[in-house]
Amino acid sequence: MRTVVLSTIALLLVLVCTAAAADVSGKWVAQIPGRQGNMMEQTFTFKASGEQLTGTVSSQRGDQEITEGKISGNDISFMTVMSFGDMQIKQIYKGTVAGNEIKFSRTMQGGRGGGAPVEFVAKKSN
């Protein structure tokens, strides 16, 4: 009997944790500030499964696969890698979901150095 009760409690905790994760599956669009103040549109296509986040980031530079994607409550994080010859640039995204918006901070590693984080907002696309 005790095993049944403990199993039921464990299952309920798993369901509550899964339900608490932000629902980010689908397309999100953002205007991201670039060099000299030029804006660049990026489309994020997310697929959420529990605490795992996969998908792609699309821009005028092409599509990059999302790696190391995680969801924790309303927070998401992931990375993309762009290659230019033998040089790789990692883009690290961290965001907070609030309704139909995700407030992002993106940092870069590799290439010509890191640079300051870039802040932007992605909006859910219908």
Image (cartoon, rainbow, N blue to C red):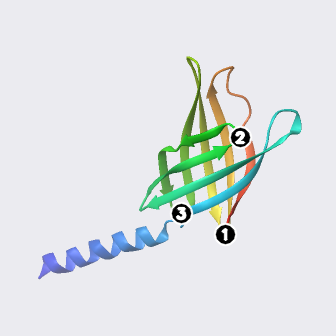
Which quadrant of the figure contains the C terminus?
bottom right
Seen from the viewer's position, the closer of residues 74 and 23 is 23
Which quadrant of the figure contains the N terminus?
bottom left
Q: Secondary structure at mark 3?
A: loop
Labels 3 and 2: the sequence-earlier one: 3
Mark 3 to mark 2 CA distance (whole Å): 22 Å
The x, y position of residue 74, in whole percent, is 57, 62
* Residue reaching furthest to the right: 36
Mark 2 to mark 1 CA distance (whole Å): 21 Å
What's under tag 1, amino acid-wise? Answer: Asn
Q: Which residue is mark 3?
A: 25
Labels 2 and 1: the sequence-earlier one: 2
Q: Circles 2 and 1: CB distance less than 8 Å?
A: no
Q: Which residue is mark 2?
A: 60
| Residue 91 quadrant | top right
On residue 14, which mark appears?
none
Q: Which residue is mark 1?
A: 126
- Foreground tag (3 vs 2): 2
Callout 2 crowding tier (Cα within 10 Å): few <14, some 14–19, many ≥20? few
- Foreground tag (1 vs 3): 1
Residue at 49% x, 48% y: name it.
Answer: 69
What's under tag 2, amino acid-wise? Answer: Gln
